[in-house]
Amino acid sequence: MVYYRKITMFPGRGVMAEQLYTIPVNDAFSEDCECPLCSIYKKLEEDAIEFTMGPSYMEDDNREVTDKLGFCKRHVKMMYANKNRLGLALMLDTHMKKVMRDLKKAAESPQPKKSLFGGTKEKSAVEEYVGSLDSSCFVCDRIETNFPRYVNTVFHLWKKDSEFKVKFKACKGFCIHHYGMLYSLSRKEMSGTQYEEFLAALNKVFFDNFERVEGDVSWFIDKYDYRNKDADWKNSRDAIPRAIIKVNDDIVE
């Protein structure tokens, strides 16, 4: 997934366009969650699934794109969990027909020539086609088109909104992936004292909360020691799912 690209904020689109991103970002940083960016990503994912399984599947232009891109394993499972089984069946039907046509054509293409040593660095048309399908997903594409704008909005709000700074410093930190993303992008988005202030706040909120969750996991383990059987669980009962969010950038249902 590619998030590390420069995005121009709200060029000539006014207050309404700005609120399209700032309100969800502010809401996410107000949540009681282990990573606001994971929360934003999850919401975008849910919206993308709803869009895909909504009336849009009947539109020819959308069906043309879904036929071409298909869906990754994760999002096929989420679509199957959606109640619109007929919509999924229609998308799978036209997608499978396109894949069958394309693969038959690819299978008829000449094979790459072998070298004198028996191997070849070239891929066959079938390998190229299957590889392209393995790396494409209609739902992923919709998310990855929008998610970088929300990440960029974090920097926009840090620069323009003093209340957001307070909210940022009070959040429960980030998963490793999104900490690294903000760390890397901050060098491009900021400079001077502003950059130093952001980086200091980012490092503090990440490490303080990473240590907090690790401590909860550690106490969860210690609770299985017979000597602690009567001790309080403290905040460790849900330590494992929170730790998974921190280390794997994923949402535990």
Image (spheres, rainbow, N blue to C red):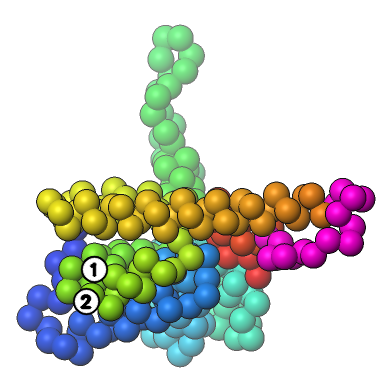
Q: Residue at x 27, y 84 (%)?
A: 20
Tag 2: residue type? Answer: Asp
**Residue 196 shown in magenta:** no
Task: Give the main secondary structure of the magenta stretch.
Answer: loop
The answer, for residue 100, to whether it is visible in the render is no
Tell whether position 237 is magenta: yes
Element type where label 1 sits in the image: helix
Percent x, y of residue 218:
70, 49
10 Å crowding of disc 2: few (<14), some (14-19), many (20+)? few
Q: Helix, strand or loop at disc 2?
A: loop
Q: Is residue 193 left or right of residue 235?
A: left
Alpha-carbon distance for marks 1 and 2?
A: 6 Å
Direction left: furthest residue? 12
Which residue does the image show at 20% across and 82% down from the upper left? 18
Residue sitting at x 55%, y 83%: 87
In the image, taking residue 118 as reference, residue 86 lies left or right, namely: right
Question: Could you tell me residue 111's position as x and y percent?
Answer: 44, 32
Query: What residue is drawn where x is 58% and y is 75%?
Result: 79
Of the pair 157 and 112, the residue shown nearer to us:
157
- Is 133 above or below relative to 10? above
Residue 138, horizontal then vertical, whole percent: 43, 67
Q: Disc 1, disc 2: CB below 8 Å? A: yes
Q: Residue furthest right?
A: 226
Residue 158 tag number = 1
Residue on which the image places disc 2: 161
Q: Quadrant of the C terminus?
A: bottom right
Residue extent of the magenta highlight: 224-239
- What's the amino acid at mark 1? Trp
Comparing 171 with 8, the one in front is 171
